[in-house]
Amino acid sequence: MIGNYIILAWRVLKRRRFFSFISLFGISFTLGIFMVILSFLQSELGDNKPLSNKDDLVFVSHIGLSKPYHDTITIIDTVFLEGVEVYDTTYDIKSEGRSMTNSPFNSSLILEYFSDLPPVERYSLFNPQETFNVYVNGVKLSIDATFTDHNYLQIFDYKILEGRRLSEVDIQEANPVMVISTKTAMNYFGTQSGLLGREIELEKQTYKIIGVFEHKARFIPYFSPDVIIPYTLQNLNEQYSYYFGKHFIIFDKESSATTQEVKNAIVTASDRIPLDHPDNRNNFETIEMRLMTFNEIFATGIYYHKDPAKGYRIVKWIIFGILLFFILLPTLNLINLNVSRIMERSSEIGVRKAFGANRGNIIFQFITENIVQTLIGGIMGLGLALLIIKILNDSGWLGNAGLTLYPKFFWYSFLATLFFGILSGLIPALKMSSLHIVKALKERTI
Amino acid sequence: MIELDKVSKVYTTKTIETTALNDISLNVAKGEFLSIMGPSGCGKSTLLNIMGLLDAPSNGQVKIDGQNISNYLGKPMAKFRNEKLGFIFQSFHLIADLSVIDNVEVPLLYRKISGKERKEMASRALDAVGLSNRKKHFPSQLSGGQKQRVAIARAIVGEPKIILADEPTGNLDSVMGDEVLDILKYLNEKEDTTIVMVTHDERMASKTDRLIRLYDGSQVA
Ligand SMILES: Nc1ncnc2c1ncn2[C@@H]1O[C@H](COP(=O)(O)OP(=O)(O)O)[C@@H](O)[C@H]1O
Ligand SMILES: [Mg+2]
């Protein structure tokens, strides 16, 4: 019986070409967009290399020094009383705010105050903001360097294809070495293997390649280095002040600790930083830092909230809402189309009921038809998603982020569409299945 | 086979009440071929629908094959119709998206019969109406007479005891109409199927066992 319904579904789709096009377009478009959004979220927020343990990490890029300022302005309110202006009330309006200055950290400050926090297993300081332009066969190539320590490639688990990571000795002795990404290796050397011992010169300093890591694009800036170099090779005496320099910090928590405990420990440690240092010329009174997990970094990019954790929760709801909207809108449209499509078949329903179909049979038939339609739309949607992802990846519109379609998202999207597909068939099916036979048969047909 | 006892049908709309059937008592014997005549709007279709359990009477009692009918909804009624009754309509009511054989198969879908057996039964029914060479055609590719023969095949495929035909020749020319009537006669005589047919054609009616006439919802002859 179900076989008959499937064949019928196919014939109905074929006969009503325009309707079929509209509804299949709706389903596949929804599914396609849904899969692309999920893939994007997964590639940014998923536990993939180099952020396999991203939920263990707390990131802080800037240290801020601030103090409140108060200005008192006296306002005198006047009123007219029987034509005579009289003084009514006097207010003091306190204009309050904070004046603040902030910057990445001085590396020495990090070593002194943040290198040994109890809930932290390891931390890394890094300066990802150095860009060098080099010329390869007359073509300009821009290389983003990250100056960092030996922990960086422990925390970010890029796959090492050749050679090794930076070692503690490399840092202590300021060895002029670098670990290079496959992307940069390809751009610079035209190959990504056999490069150990080769050299690259960046602004008169020659670096020897000791390792090659697999390039992974991320949409979040600062986390896609082209080359990784010991931070001790930069002149650390030329930092801006006792507080300020060029370094960000990433903390990797102890497995038993929570990221909140890490955040608390960072705040506690920052309380010990002296504010009576001569470099604090403006007599700032407070130290402020924005401590974020990776999910919170991502959320901050979409919606800024003073409390990153709250911002993340809000962004989660926003994304959920958008996805729901994407699914719901075409569903409503489909319900509408299905109602009119099934209405046109009232003669068929009348005949089937006259010849012994009960309500359940009719509902089952139309649901089956909708599922077949959704399946076809689903396959088209998968194709569409792959196409969109390919176009996005090829165009480079997403910066250096690369999307891949994960099979599980196909299934999520598919189940969601199936659910709404059934729903969109159920409503008209319920309506039509209760149609009175004699009325249904009034419809003229072949 | 069909017993109607003081059956009335009143249609109530917002503005008017129409008495479509007025106190009809009627017995159709097993194996009888009854025709119903009367002017347009006199209640013929209404009467046939009540006999076919497609509609409930406002008053009175309907008995089919010895069974009193009280509940017109739900699965048992659908099953009862499926097993006992076959319908032929003036406007054929074939399903456009289904091939001839698939149309004929429809009543069997609602029984527990395998796909293979369904196809065999449908083929036999098509043989009986002389359309075994049109199985894969679609309704739009058939003439009116052929369509009505497909509809007859569909009505008889489940071997019902009763066939109800509402102006089955109304949309056909006289040659095709005669063909259709011959098939019904054959079913009635050879298969002992009880048939009730509404018709406007005295000549058709004269070929049946008995004729009743309706006027304004009442039986006049
Ligand atoms: N669903 C309905 N609602 C209201 N009046 C109806 C309905 N169906 C039929 N009638 C009325 O009942 C009367 C009998 O109709 P019908 O049985 O179809 O007549 P016939 O088949 O003899 O032409 C007609 O007056 C018709 O207008
Ligand atoms: Mg009629």
Image (spheres, rainbow, N blue to C red):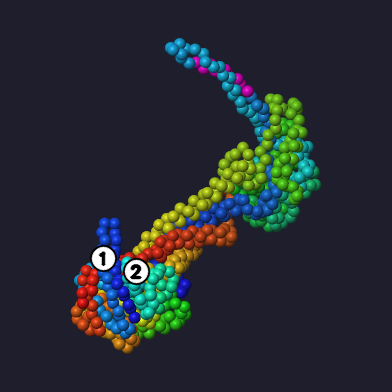
- Based on the displayed image, in which of its 4 quarters is residue B50 positioned? bottom left
In the shown orientation, is residue B38 left or right of residue A220? left
Q: Residue at x 60, y 53 (%)?
A: A42
Q: Main secondary structure of the magenta part?
A: strand
Q: Under tag 2, what secondary structure?
A: loop
Numbered badge on residue B19: 1
- Based on the displayed image, in which of its 4 quarters is residue A405 positioned? bottom right
Numbered badge on residue A181: none
Other residues around mark 1 within 10 Å, as few (<14) / some (14–19) / many (≥20): some
In the shown orientation, is residue A342 left or right of residue A415? left
Farthest residue, direction bottom = B190
Lower position in the chain sequence, tag 1 or tag 2: 1
Residue A191 in view (yes/no): yes
Q: Under tag 1, what secondary structure?
A: strand
In the shown orientation, is residue B148 left or right of residue B121? left
Q: Is residue A77 magenta?
A: yes
Q: Which residue is mark 2?
A: B56
Residue A376 in view (yes/no): no
Segment colored magenta: A70-78
Residue B137 placement (x, y as % from top left): 35, 77
Chain letter, disc 1 residue = B
Q: Say which of A81 and A287 sits in front.
A: A81
Chain letter, disc 2 residue = B
Other residues around mark 2 within 10 Å, as few (<14) / some (14–19) / many (≥20): many
Cα distance between the residues tagged 1 and 2: 14 Å
